Image: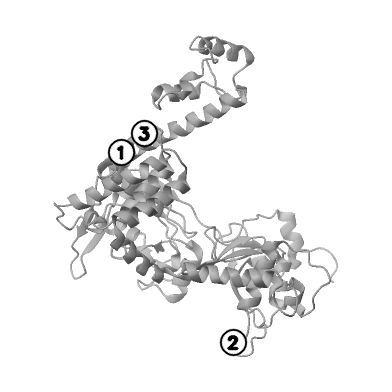
Amino acid sequence: MDVTEGCINDEQWQALLDVVVADGPRDGLASLDAAPGIDLIRRLATTVPHRLDAADAVRYLRATERALGWLAALQSDALVAIAGPRPQVDVYEVADAPVISIEDASRSEIAAATGWSEPWTHDRVLTARFLHGLLPLTRTALARGRISSRQADVIAEAAQRLSGYARWADSTIDSTDDAPFRRSCTDLEGAILPTAEGRGVSATRRAAARALERIDAAASAHRRRDARHTRDVRVIDEGDGIATLLARMGIEQAHACLTAINALAQGALADGPLTQGALADGATPARDDRLVGERRADALVHLVLRDAATAAPTAIRTHVDVVIDLPTLLGLAEEPGTIRGGGPGGPMPVAAEVIRRLVASDASATMRRLVCDPLTGHLLDRGRTTYRVPDALRAFIEDRDRTCRFPGCHRRAGLTQIDHAIPWDAGGATSRENVGALCTRHHQLKTHAGWAITASTSDGSCRWRSPSGFGYERPAAPLVDPHPRSPDADRSADPARSTGPDP
């Protein structure tokens, strides 16, 4: 009987209920409270949630969460089966070159097969190794649905911070005596699990922090010292003219900054409340209807954008890479452009009037134009034919590919190497069809570990073959959305084809 939601009819549903009711007095759904396993999965698959009352729908939801934990434990089995119980390092000796070391080459196949990013795959494999070697009680709790996979991640992340982890994870070191590290892991999960099994992720994380301080105080102090080197400020573009400014700093500095921002946002300055209008032209509107968050954002701008000598507000200076298609560049079309920002999603679309206003509002603003084919959205050709990749071709490849060309890898192209798909010594040309961006890890996998690019095209798309024989596609990354035009539209946009009177 087909019981797929959307396909089941009332007669089939009643027949299913007749079977289910025989199991118990509460509509036969008591089995949803059972331990996760095949029987629970079967019951979930043969129960239509929208037919349940509110109480049973909650029981169904809780059952799915337990089942997901069970499946996560099974998935960790598969990850360890592929990647091994400990990190593996493959060493390749190359004549007249430094020794090449590649850690966990199998991890890249996992990433390509699942569509996971390399960092996410690294974390998943790490958690799986901890569950199967160092945190067995945590794996049992996950498989029995007593904790979620996210809580298991928190416990594994805490174990990674213990003294001795680096030595255990370094397969080049003969670490036969890892008993102290194993004991620390046992103590850690023993301290965290009682909280994790009765609380949520946040409580688990707090319990992990307390356990680390108690079990390994010296390592905690060392991490605090090292963490200060990770302080930074960056921008993530979100679209719709909005971006997020991220500032990573010491906790005392962060709270001090927020206190100053709140004070200014609440109108604590002697010259009265700060408004968006006051920032723009020095005039304070009579009414300020901004939300609290908006006032905080404006207060931060007011505090930061000030002349160091006079403390007077300064003009906003802007530099952007504006991506436009060729007809728009020539004045034959009015397609939206994009601003290449710092967000993980790539270029941010922006309306033409926004670009014009941005440039017109500040004479110091600068633009760099990246011209694209309007039919495909791909960057236009600037190829070369020498082995050494010329600067112009390198810049073209970085703008075209934007990230490493390995499936699922998002490392920025500006931080990668330029690779020949067909090696130069095998007849491969230094051309836009044959070169592309590869990060160091994936360049080494291609050169030494059995990965191969079987097809590479001028738009940046390529096809990979893994050491296991599986094929993976990496599509091109257009800089603008393609917008094919009809022949009529092309004729109307081309003055040479126009049959109307001269303007």
Q: Residue furthest bottom?
A: 309
Nearer the camera: disc 3 or disc 1: 1
- Residue 137 numbered mark, or none: 1
Return the residue at label 3.
143
- Residue 375 numbered mark, or none: none
Separation of residues labelled 2 and 1 (CA atoms):
57 Å
Amino acid type, residue under disc 2 in the picture? Ala
- Provide residue 452's location: percent of width, then percent of height: 33, 53
Disc 1 on helix, strand or loop? Answer: helix
Kindly indicate the quadrant of the structure image that contains residue 353.
bottom right
Mark toward the start of the polypeptide (2 vs 1): 1
Q: Is residue 438 above or below residue 283?
A: above
Amino acid type, residue under disc 3 in the picture? Ala
Disc 2 on helix, strand or loop? Answer: loop
Return the residue at label 2.
308
Residue 468 visible within the image:
no
Q: Label 2 neighbourhood size at 10 Å, few (<14), some (14-19), many (20+)?
A: few
Separation of residues labelled 3 and 1 (CA atoms):
10 Å
